[in-house]
Amino acid sequence: MSFFQDALAVFKKRDLLFLESYKESEDVYTFLFEKENDLSWIAGQHGLFTISHKKIKNKTRPFTIASSPTEKVVRITMRISENPSEFKKAMLELKQGMTINMVGPLGSFNLKDNGISLFIACGIGITPFRSILKQIESEGNGIDKPIHLLYLDSTKSYIFKDELDEIANNTSINVTYLDSRDDLFQEIDTFSTLNKGNGKYFIAGPRSMVKSVFDFLKSKHIPKKNIKKDAFYGY
Ligand SMILES: Cc1cc2nc3c(=O)[nH]c(=O)nc-3n(C[C@H](O)[C@H](O)[C@H](O)COP(=O)(O)OP(=O)(O)OC[C@H]3O[C@@H](n4cnc5c(N)ncnc54)[C@H](O)[C@@H]3O)c2cc1C
């Protein structure tokens, strides 16, 4: 998605009808909204979501659309800790029939070609990869996709694990679950040695983690053009 397309998408506002929410793990919740027929996105993109059912101060946040467009629902999955922001409190108060406003879709964090790719998900950064992998699964062309997902979560509460395991079973996509940064760097090292600078690297998660992985890739002389980042600020 080009800057020009993003600029146009900013004018695309719509209200999404809330369907349901549920807990994925101790501090992660999923919210589902109706997907109208004329709404689509490229797997991996995000939207700007604005609370509209009550007045709060900072009422807009970006969230990845964690569903693939083929899933017929708009899913956002977010971390909500013990002391939630006003925005997240308002999310938890959503009831069936209420709406949230979405601007977008936005962003260029998506798979463009069929080359060898390493997906690096840090914690909640699994959301865009869920969307991309679900899309590949639904198109039924994951048999030859040379994709390896490294999923780091220090608390080992890997959300979407059942779905990811199913995708790994039905396609050639590999998933490795990790709980330490050292092990993550070791896996990245192995991948980059095997692929001799050919692979594409996709990193998503809290901004500090994305930066740390990006710096590691640079130290391994991975060209910047082979790295895509989706940095979630606010964590
Ligand atoms: C492209 C994108 C996709 C994202 N996808 C997800 C997702 O799928 N799931 C998910 O849980 N989160 C996602 N996020 C992060 C999300 O938008 C929120 O920032 C995060 O959930 C924290 O929100 P909060 O209401 O808890 O905290 P906040 O009240 O927003 O604040 C937390 C901290 O972040 C700082 N902060 C707030 N806004 C900014 C800003 N614009 N620039 C710099 N610092 C800021 C605040 O000062 C504070 O210190 C995404 C972010 C981006 C940019």
Image (tube, rainbow, N blue to C red):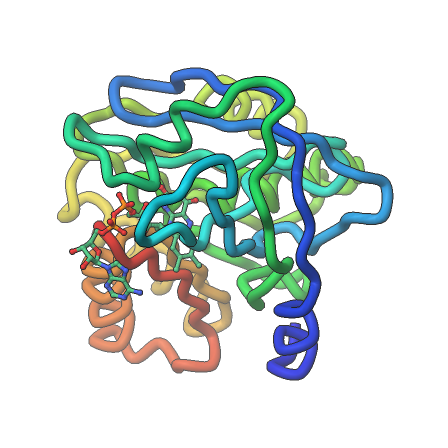
| Relative image position of residue 201 (x, y in whole percent) | 44, 63
Looking at the rendering, which quadrant does residue 169 occupy?
top right
Considering depth in this image, is 116 or 21 the residue closer to the camera? 21
x 49%, y 20%: residue:
21
x 62%, y 69%: residue:
10
* Residue furthest to the right: 37
In the displayed structure image, the side of residue 176 where residue 166 appears, left or right = right
x 79%, y 36%: residue:
140
Looking at the rendering, which quadrant does residue 142 occupy?
top right
* Residue furthest to the front: 55
Looking at the rendering, which quadrant does residue 88 occupy?
top left
* Residue 23 higher or lower than 203, as above or below: above
| Relative image position of residue 206 (x, y in whole percent) | 27, 53
**Quick one: quadrant of the N terminus?**
bottom right
| Relative image position of residue 5 (x, y in whole percent) | 69, 76
In the displayed structure image, the side of residue 219 where residue 187 appears, left or right = right
Considering depth in this image, is 186 or 120 the residue closer to the camera? 120
In the displayed structure image, the side of residue 33 where residue 197 appears, left or right = left
| Relative image position of residue 197 (x, y in whole percent) | 43, 74
* Residue 197 higher or lower than 182, as above or below: below
Considering depth in this image, is 170 or 132 the residue closer to the camera? 132
x 56%, y 59%: residue:
116
How many numbered circles are shown? 0
